[in-house]
Image (cartoon, rainbow, N blue to C red):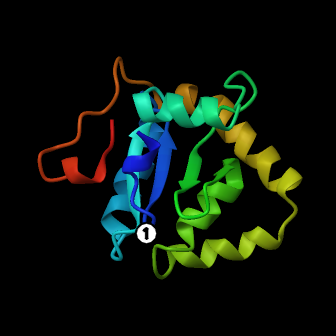
Amino acid sequence: MISQIPNNKQLILFDGVCNLCNSSVLYVIKRDSNNKFLFAPLESKIGTEIIKKFNIDTEKTDSILLYNAEKDKLTYKSTAALLIASHLGLPTNLLSVFLIVPAFFRNWVYNYIAKNRYKWYGKKESCMIPTAELKSKFID
């Protein structure tokens, strides 16, 4: 499945039942003018494959994951979010300036939000089903 990701794309893996995560995915889709990103829930087949390949402990990493097919590299938490933002144009790409902040501090903030996301934003019963118009952006 990983082989079906074109080298010029990056795959964003997200929590498919999280309302904040789903809203973030829709935000990225609207601003991805260079068509750089594909999407899949962490719970999907390709999500599971990448988690296994990179030996991610899902008990310790409750996070957005960004897979770069060209480099066969995986980033997560605040680094992934900021790298995604860097490709989205003004003003969102300005957030990438926070990459200069040490990851341990950025991830402390990220972890706090991630820990409370269901309480603050809610949770769906099942993963988001993309509309026909957005289906080409998603991999199962």
* Residue toward you, 94 or 40: 40
Tell me the residue that label 1 is attached to: 8
Determine whether 108 is above or below 36 in the image. Answer: above
Image x and y of residue 72, in percent: 60, 55
Where residue 115 appears, as percent x and y from the top left, is 68, 30
User: Where is residue 82, by image quadrant?
Assistant: bottom right
Is residue 132 among the parts visible in the rendering?
Answer: yes
For residue 109, above or below residue 99: above
The correct choice, above or below, for 99 with respect to 104 in the image is below
- Residue at image x 73%, y 39%? 111
Position of residue 11 in the picture relative to residue 51 (left or right):
left
The residue furthest bottom is 90
Left/right of residue 68 with respect to residue 137 in the rendered view: right
Which corner quadrant holds the N terminus?
A: top left
Q: Secondary structure at mark 1?
A: loop
Residue in view at x 67 percent, y 48 percent: 76
Quadrant, the C terminus: top left
Q: Is residue 133 above or below residue 13?
A: below
Residue furthest to the left in view is 132
Q: Residue visible at 65% across and 73% down?
A: 96
Position of 104 compared to 88: left or right?
Answer: right
The number of discs equals 1
The residue closer to the viewer here, 113 or 8, is 8
The answer to whether any part of residue 16 appears in the image is no
Q: Position of residue 80 (x, y in %)?
A: 63, 56
The amino acid at mark 1 is Asn
Q: How far across and how far down the image is residue 32, in percent?
A: 37, 69
The residue lying furthest to the top in this view is 125
